[in-house]
Image (spheres, rainbow, N blue to C red):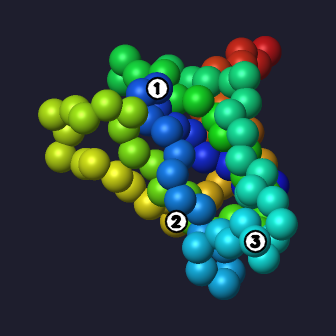
Amino acid sequence: MKYFFLSDGWVTGRVWEFGGLWNERAWQRKPHLRRLNLAIHEQGETLWLYQVEEAVLMVEVKPVAESESAFNQVVLKRLMTAEQVIERLCADYPTAVG
């Protein structure tokens, strides 16, 4: 599995796999992509953790409503491994030693 964090107010769009855009007819299904019930808070924003299957290479994300942001859509090309997610979560919640 692969992962990414996505801000509240943003949704997923198109999905790419090795051969290009995800082809539901060829795969005979939609890609496995789901929001997990885990979030971090960073700079006043809630970032939700999403999980995608290994075959997914890139995910388009875009704001739900038109915003004043300079970005109308973004393509996430560097998805995270489970180990990277754990490192990120641990950086937000350090444990005391000693």
Residue at the disc numbered 3: 25
Ranked by sequence position, the earlier of labels 3 and 1 is: 1
Q: Say which of marks 2 and 3 sits in front.
A: 3
Question: Which quadrant is home to the N terminus?
Answer: bottom right
Q: Are marks 2 and 3 in contact (CB under 8 Å)?
A: no
Helix, strand or loop at label 3? It is: helix
Mark 2–mark 3 distance (CA, rounded to whole Å): 23 Å
Q: Say which of marks 3 and 1 sits in front.
A: 3
Mark 3–mark 1 distance (CA, rounded to whole Å): 31 Å
| Residue type for callout 3 | Arg
Vertical relation: 23 (above or below) 85: below
Helix, strand or loop at label 2? It is: loop
| Residue type for callout 2 | Lys
| Residue type for callout 1 | Asp
- Residue at 59%, 30% in the rendered image: 48
Neighbor class of circle 2 (other Cα within 10 Å; few <14, some 14-19, many 20+) is few
Q: Position of residue 11 (x, y in %)?
A: 49, 39
Residue 44, quarter of picture: top left
Q: Is residue 62 left or right of residue 34?
A: left
Give the label on residue 77, or none.
Answer: 2
Residue 20, quarter of picture: bottom right
Q: Is residue 83 visible?
A: no
Residue 94, quarter of picture: top right
Helix, strand or loop at label 1? It is: loop
Q: Is residue 11 left or right of residue 94?
A: left
- Residue at 53%, 59% in the rendered image: 14
Q: Position of residue 61 (x, y in %)?
A: 46, 49
Residue at the disc numbered 1: 8
- Residue at 81%, 70% in the rendered image: 27
Ranked by sequence position, the earlier of labels 2 and 3 is: 3
